[in-house]
Amino acid sequence: MKQKFHKWFWVWEFEKEIRWINEMAAKGFGLCHVGIATYWFDDIEPGEYTYHLELAENQPMSEKGQEYLDFLNECGVEYVGSFLRWTYLRKKAADGPFELHADLDSKLAHLKRIVLLLLPVMFLNIWSSYLNIHHALRHSSDGNLFVGMMNLWCSAMVGYAVVRIGIQIRRLKKERQLHE
């Protein structure tokens, strides 16, 4: 029986999201579809699957994205769904541990992909904020002021995400230096 859950995770909380999905799988809920802060689950045997989430290099339905998913499928990994480039995957727990980014370099590359996705969003919001607030001040437009302030808030949230992920990147780089 399908069940729908609404849960919000910030972009820097993707590891927390993975843990939650795996906790649901341990209770017998198998992720089958995703949307904006919405997750659909089917009944499965508790602990049957282990789930993972990653920001893919390419859209899953693009040619390169499909080649990547085909490669993962050959390794026993199933594509569950995606939201934009966030890709939800699962593997039978009986097949062993499921870790897409087992080494430091691939973890760093994944985190850098996330930052490279967020930076343009942050700068576009800053620019839009500037334009809207400038227009509001020149023409006494409350609507533009509101939109400008919302853009400013969005850029601050995205900036916070970039900083949080940047801290993770710095921590992994230090860890890599210790192992060299």
Image (cartoon, rainbow, N blue to C red):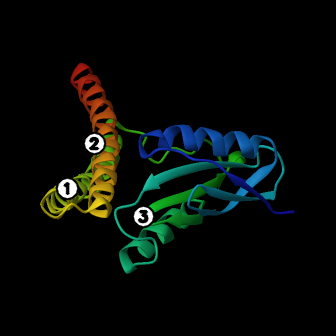
The N terminus - image quarter: bottom right
Residue at the (58%, 59%) spot, across then down: 77
Mark 1 touches mark 2? (CB < 8 Å)? no
Residue 106 visible in the shown view: no
For residue 145, which quarter of the picture? bottom left
Residue 146 falls left or right of residue 133: right
- Residue of label 2: 159
Query: Which mark, by number, is residue 133?
Result: 1
Which tag, 2 or 3, sits closer to the chain's start?
A: 3
Depicted 30 relative to depicted 97: above or below? below
Which tag, 3 or 1, sits closer to the chain's start?
A: 3
- Residue of label 3: 85
Q: CA distance from mark 3 to mark 1?
A: 32 Å
Residue 11 visible in the shown view: yes
- Considering every residue shown, the one lying at the far front of the view is 140
Residue 46 falls left or right of residue 34: right
Point out residue 47 in the picture as x, y percentages from the top left corner: 76, 43
